[in-house]
Amino acid sequence: MGSIRLEGVSKTFGRTTVIPGVDLDIKDGTFVVFVGPSGCGKSTLLRLIAGLEDVSAGRIIIDGNDVAKLPPAKRGLAMVFQSYALYPHMTVRKNIGFGLRMAGRPRDEVARKVEAASNVLNLSAYLDRKPGELSGGQRQRVAIGRAIVREPKAFLFDEPLSNLDAALRVQMRLEIARLQKNLATTTVYVTHDQVEAMTLADRIVVLNGGRVEQVGSPLELYARPDNLFVAGFIGSPRMNFVSGELAARMGAATIGVRPEHIVASRDGEGWRGTVVAAEHLGSDTFLYIDVPQTDGITARAIGELGLKQGDPVRLASDPARIHRFDSQGRALRQ
Amino acid sequence: MARRVSPARIALTTVVAWTVGFVIFFPILWTVLTSFKTELEAFSIPPKFLFFKWTLENYRLVQERSDYLAHAWNSVVLSFGSVLLAMLIAVPAAWAMAFAPTERTRGTLLWMLSTKMMPSVGVLVPVYLIYRDLGLLDSHIGLIALLCLANLPIVVWMLFTYFKEIPKGILEASRMDGIGTGREIVFVLAPMALPGIASTLLLNVVLAWNEAFWTLNLTTSKAAPLTAFIASYSSPEGLFWAKLSAASTLAIAPILVLGWLTQRQLVRGLTFGAVK
């Protein structure tokens, strides 16, 4: 079991309020991702749950018990750090088993659990090495191994993939997803990378300035963002926003449309524009288009569309795909 | 590409380095040589460098007149005792300052260091009177406590700088692993900081070994270390250079050997963190 509930959790450092007050419900077994730009308080919130920082106010309830005043060790959680934070003077075997040994578990039980974890994580060949002799991906697997042997109520991941190169990141992302599905352990995962958030999460919590902007499944956030911030943060390349007269015509202060929902053509219906730049990625082409009365529009076209810099272009979009926002940035629903 | 250095330059720097090294080492060499001379040759002018009649007479007389081993043992007890005691206090203190600092941590550290700037003689009378009334004069306990306090600021500072180098995340990981503060220090911090702890220990043992002001003023015989052993060969009966040199050689020999054997640790300790 591992349900986590935050009630009015806030954190201030001196006079700076980092988290003004967060309420959140994390159901047992779900994979929740905190995502937001750097400095949005997502790591602080994770550290508050972990107990590495003390809450200034509010309650943190794990499986029905308020743990806000308990030290990290008493909360039954395990954490994987961005820097891996392995014990450099211990072998992989000892790193993974350290928590269990310190808890006074019998030697053979520790050995068995370390063995099992290292099999799951493909670390069996490295058990007698020290962290300094491992690659970044292997180190991160050791850190994950250290977390899973303790059979915690929940895993906490603090940007675990940021120190890995791009290819390894994709591979580890898949491994983490697979592992979490197999173990079905509640997981809270912090990242600034919205692709990681979209691919891993059952539910995404979008944070901005210490506030929860929206909570929902990846596709909910993509299809029905509550506000401008979420609309701009989720999705890559980011949503195009247009204000002023063009938006007013649709009864909104701002309208937003995703690059992939814009159809660009040489001749047809829609806004007139000029191609400023075209990025050909093979499967996709990103077009950066200068359109009067806008700050420029990005459009995604499939495959090789023969448009190049300076070409005139017409842009159209399905009206149902256009998001409307009021002057406060809140979404207007039909 | 590496910087190209001409052979002439290498030769020059080698000569300069050896010269400086020799100048620094010369007083010790001269002391050792003098200890093997007769009293007459010890202050002959011009001084004799190597060609004199080598004798062990001084060592025999020194050992006859005073008990070298008793003093040496006192030096060991006082230096190691005071530094180990200081470690017991300083490790938790430095841990707190490095990993749980408050607004006043920096000020506290600077204040601790500033106490080293006060001349010891300024508090000699009160300390002497207190020690006399408590019966701590010429006792191991009293001297260990005093030397411990005298070196504590340096011990805390050194450990603090070493601990600062250790990533906080690793200690947090151990906290998540369910470990309390005491075991965190023993099983996680101490092994990682071992080079730093070792060099702090060594350097402060050397400092305590060489400490002369308090040991000379507060001891007479029972707890008197080698500093008092050397001092007893100056003035009263006139200056006996050869015997004084023999006593000094005997007194510095153990610490010289210790320094020689641990020089890698010492240098590493002093430059720890300077290079990554």
Image (spheres, rainbow, N blue to C red):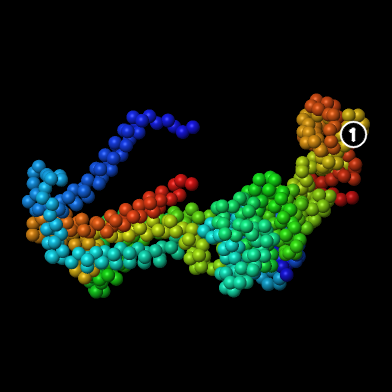
Dot 1 corresponds to which residue? A270
> Please, which residue is most extreme toward the right here?
A268
Q: Is residue A141 above or below residue B45?
A: below
Q: Quadrant of residue A69?
A: bottom right
Q: Chain of mark 1?
A: A
Q: Name the residue located 71 percent from the left edge and 71 percent from the top edge.
A: A63
**Image position, residue A105 (x, y; %):** 59, 73
Residue A251 appearing in the image: no
Disc 1 residue type (three-letter) = Gly
Q: Quadrant of residue B202?
A: bottom left
Q: Image check: B9 left or right of B25?
A: right
Q: Image check: B148 left or right of A46?
A: left
Q: Name the residue located 34 percent from the left edge and 29 percent from the top edge.
A: B8
Q: Name the residue located 73 percent from the left edge and 70 percent from the top edge.
A: A1
> Please, which residue is most extreme toward the top here?
A310
Secondary element at image label 1 = loop
Say which of A147 and A94 sits in front: A94
Q: Image check: A319 left or right of A79?
A: right
Q: Is residue A321 above or below residue B89?
A: above
Q: Is residue A80 above or below residue A266?
A: below
**Image position, residue A26 (x, y; %):** 74, 63
